[in-house]
C-alpha cells in the first residue's frame, strides 16, 4: 500500500530509503525492516528481518604480475570460487593462480558461496607488447609496459633491436628480445621469417598459362585483380583472363609478403600475307601485334627471318609458321612450299630461223622467253621460233602456282652473207670460209652444182646465195640485182637514188628517198667502206682505181650496184 515509510532497526548494518524502500547493506549482521502506514484513524506497520551477508575479504597477491611469471592469490573468506577476465593478458592454470602472458589487465574475482557476494582485484600484467614475428629485411615495434630499462637481442645475426624497441629482421631464425626493467624485466622470442622474390612468369596471354614460384614454401598466392589474371593458391599457376596488368602476391606462412606484376597480353592477330612460295623464293608475312618473333615449325621445308617475317621456301611441303609475342602466346598459319616444274628438255642451241620445241612433264604451265622481241618466240606448246641471229635467251616454264624453271638457249650468230662483184673475173663472190654454198638465180632458181664461193656472171636479173656454217646453220644473202647496162662509169640509179660525182676525188654524195647502206668494194671483192645511212661518204683515202658501190635498203635488200671511179 502506498503512502507509508520504510525504516531499519540498525543503520550500522544496513540503511534504507524511507520513501522508495531501497536497502543498502553496510556490514554483516541482522536487521529488522519496518513499513509504517499512518492515518487519522490509526497507525499500522509491518516488519521483516533481513540478514546482511558480509562481502568476501580483499584478494591478496602479487600486483603487478610480470609476463611469464605465475602468482597465487588468496581470500580470507572461506568456501568461495575463483574466476578471472582478461585472457589476452593472463591465464589461470589453477584456482587462485595467474600466469602473465601479455601486458594488460587481468581481473580476478572471488565469489562467496551463500549470497554470491564477490571481491575483485585488477592485476596489471607488465612486460613486452608487440608482434613476435618479423620478415627478414623488415621491422616491427615492441613496447614495454615498464620504463627505465634497456632493449637487447640474444642473436644479433638474426634480429637487431633499437633503443625504442624497433626490431629489425636481419637473418632467418629466432632471437630473444629482452627489456631489462628494474620492476618487471621481460623478454619475447622473435621469429624472423624468410622472404624471397617471386620468380617466374611476368606476362601471359589471354587464356594462356604460366607458373610463378617462391622458394619459401607453404604460402598462399593472391591476385589483386582476378578479372585480369587468376592464380592458383597451390602451384602458382597464372591464367590470363583479359588484357591488362595485375599484382600477384605471395603470403608466406610467417606472414611475409612478396609482390610481382603480371601483364596479360592480347592474343596476336591473324598472320597476313601470301602463304605460298616456291623453293628458293621468299614471301613476307605480317601481324598487327608488335614485338613478336617469327619461327618455322619445319625449317627443312621453310625458314623464316625472326624479326622480319620473310619466309624462304626450301623444299615442296607444308610448314607451320609461328608469330610469338611470348612463350605459349602465338598466332599460326599453314605455309605451303609449292613444287618446282620438272626440268625442261629440248635443244641447248639453235640456228637462226629454225623452229624447235621445248618440253616439260609438268602440266598446266606457260612458256616465256627472256628476249621475246629479239631472239625467240615461244608459244603455248613450247614451240620456239628464232628471230634475229645470235645471242643468249632464257626459256622459262611457269606453273599456275608461279613456280618456274628455266633453260638457257644459245642462238648462233650468222649474219647474212654479202655478195660482191668481181670485175676482173666477171664473177659474183660470196664471203669465203663456209663449208657449203648454194647459189640461186631468177631464171632457174636453184643452180645445180653452183656450190662454190663464186658464181660466173650470166645475164639473169638477180642472184643470191645460201651458206651453211660449221654448226649446220644456214643464212641467205640479200638478192643481188645484176644490171649490166648500169655498170658503166656514168651509170645512173633511177629516179629515187642518185650517186655523184662519178668519177670522184673527195666526197661521194648519195641522194636517196630512203635510208641506204653503202658498201664499196674493190675489184678483188675486198670491202673498203661499209657505211649505214649513207649520205656523204669520204673516199679520199681510197687509192685511185675502179670500185663497185652497192646500196642496200633497211631490210638488207640490194637496191642497186654500179661502178665508181676514184681519181
Image: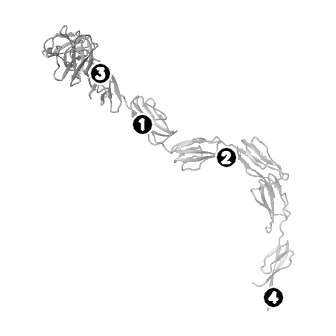
Which x, y percent locates residue 175? 76, 44
Which x, y percent locates residue 9? 85, 79
Marks 3/4 in contact by CB < 8 Å: the verdict is no
Which x, y percent locates residue 478? 21, 18
Q: Say which mark, if any, is on residue 334.
A: 1
CA separation in Å, label 3 and label 4: 157 Å
**3 or 1: mark nearer the eye:** 3
The residue labelled by disc 3 is 346
Looking at the picture, tell me which residue is in the foreground, 195 or 447. Answer: 447
Do we see residue 4 in this rendering? yes
Which x, y percent locates residue 207? 50, 45
The residue labelled by disc 2 is 256
Residue 558, image quadrant? top left
The residue labelled by disc 4 is 43
Closer to the chain start, of discs 2 and 1, is 2
Q: SS class of the residue under badge 2? A: loop
Q: Going by the image, does 369 lie left or right of 266?
A: left
Q: Going by the image, does 203 lie left or right of 425?
A: right
Say if 461 sits above or below 213 in the image: above
Looking at the picture, tell me which residue is in the foreground, 194 or 356. Answer: 356
Amino acid at each position: 500500500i502506498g503512502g507509508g515509510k520504510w525504516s531499519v532497526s540498525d543503520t550500522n548494518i544496513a540503511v534504507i530509503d524511507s520513501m522508495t524502500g531501497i536497502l543498502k547493506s553496510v556490514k554483516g549482521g541482522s536487521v529488522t525492516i519496518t513499513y509504517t502506514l499512518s492515518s487519522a484513524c490509526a497507525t499500522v506497520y509491518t516488519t521483516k528481518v533481513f540478514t546482511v551477508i558480509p562481502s568476501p575479504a580483499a584478494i591478496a597477491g602479487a600486483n603487478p604480475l610480470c609476463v611469464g611469471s605465475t602468482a597465487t592469490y588468496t581470500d580470507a573468506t572461506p568456501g568461495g570460487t575463483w574466476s578471472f577476465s582478461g585472457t589476452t593478458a593472463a591465464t589461470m592454470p589453477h584456482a587462485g593462480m595467474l600466469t602473465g602472458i601479455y601486458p594488460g589487465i587481468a581481473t580476478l574475482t572471488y565469489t562467496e558461496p551463500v549470497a554470491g557476494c564477490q571481491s575483485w582485484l585488477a592485476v596489471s600484467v607488465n612486460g613486452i607488447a608487440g608482434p613476435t614475428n618479423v620478415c627478414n629485411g623488415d621491422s616491427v615495434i615492441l613496447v614495454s609496459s615498464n620504463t627505465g630499462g634497456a632493449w637487447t637481442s640474444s642473436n644479433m645475426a638474426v634480429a637487431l633491436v633499437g633503443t625504442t624497441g624497433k626490431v629489425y629482421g636481419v637473418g632467418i631464425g629466432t632471437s630473444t628480445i629482452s627489456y631489462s626493467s628494474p620492476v618487471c624485466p621481460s623478454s619475447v622470442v622473435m621469429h624472423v621469417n624468410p622472404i624471397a622474390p617471386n620468380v617466374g612468369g611476368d606476362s601471359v596471354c589471354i587464356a594462356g598459362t604460366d607458373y610463378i614460384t617462391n622458394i619459401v614454401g607453404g604460402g598462399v598466392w593472391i591476385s589483386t585483380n582476378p578479372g585480369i589474371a587468376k592464380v592458383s593458391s597451390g602451384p602458382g599457376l597464372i591464367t590470363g583472363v583479359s588484357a591488362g596488368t595485375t599484382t600477384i602476391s605471395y603470403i608466406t606462412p610467417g606472414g611475409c609478403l612478396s609482390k610481382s606484376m603480371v601483364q596479360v597480353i592480347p592474343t596476336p592477330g591473324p598472320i597476313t600475307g601470301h602463304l605460298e612460295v616456291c623453293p628458293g623464293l621468299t614471301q613476307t608475312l605480317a601481324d598487327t601485334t608488335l614485338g613478336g618473333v617469327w619461327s618455322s615449325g619445319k625449317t627443312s621445308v621453310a625458314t623464316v627471318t625472326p624479326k622480319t617475317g620473310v619466309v624462304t621456301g626450301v623444299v615442296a611441303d607444308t610448314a607451320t609458321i609461328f608469330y610469338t609475342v611470348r612463350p605459349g602466346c602465338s598466332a599460326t598459319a599453314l605455309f605451303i612450299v609449292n613444287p618446282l616444274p620438272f626440268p625442261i628438255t629440248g635443244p641447248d642451241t639453235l640456228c637462226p630461223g629454225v623452229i624447235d620445241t621445248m618440253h616439260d612433264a609438268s602440266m598446266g604451265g606457260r612458256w616465256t622467253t627472256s628476249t621475246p622481241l629479239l631472239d625467240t618466240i615461244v608459244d603455248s606448246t613450247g614451240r620456239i621460233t628464232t628471230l634475229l641471229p645470235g645471242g643468249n635467251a632464257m626459256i622459262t616454264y611457269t606453273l599456275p602456282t608461279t613456280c618456274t624453271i628455266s633453260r638457257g638457249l644459245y642462238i648462233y650468230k650468222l649474219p647474212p652473207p654479202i655478195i660482191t662483184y668481181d670485175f676482173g673475173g666477171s664473177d659474183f663472190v660470196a664471203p669465203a670460209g663456209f663449208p657449203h654454198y648454194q647459189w640461186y638465180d631468177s631464171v632457174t632458181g636453184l643452180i645445180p652444182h653452183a656450190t662454190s664461193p663464186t658464181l660466173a656472171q650470166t645475164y639473169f636479173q638477180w642472184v643470191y646465195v645460201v651458206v651453211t656454217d660449221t654448226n649446220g646453220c644456214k643464212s641467205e644473202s640479200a638478192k643481188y640485182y645484176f644490171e649490166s647496162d648500169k655498170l658503166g662509169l656514168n651509170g645512173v640509179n633511177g629516179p629515187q637514188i642518185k650517186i655523184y660525182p662519178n668519177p670522184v676525188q673527195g666526197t661521194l654524195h648519195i641522194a636517196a628517198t630512203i635510208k641506204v647502206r653503202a658498201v664499196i668494194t674493190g675489184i678483188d671483192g675486198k670491202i673498203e667502206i661499209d657505211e649505214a645511212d649513207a649520205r656523204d661518204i669520204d673516199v679520199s683515202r681510197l687509192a685511185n682505181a675502179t670500185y663497185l658501190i652497192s646500196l642496200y635498203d633497211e631490210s638488207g635488200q640490194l637496191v642497186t650496184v654500179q661502178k665508181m671511179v676514184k681519181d
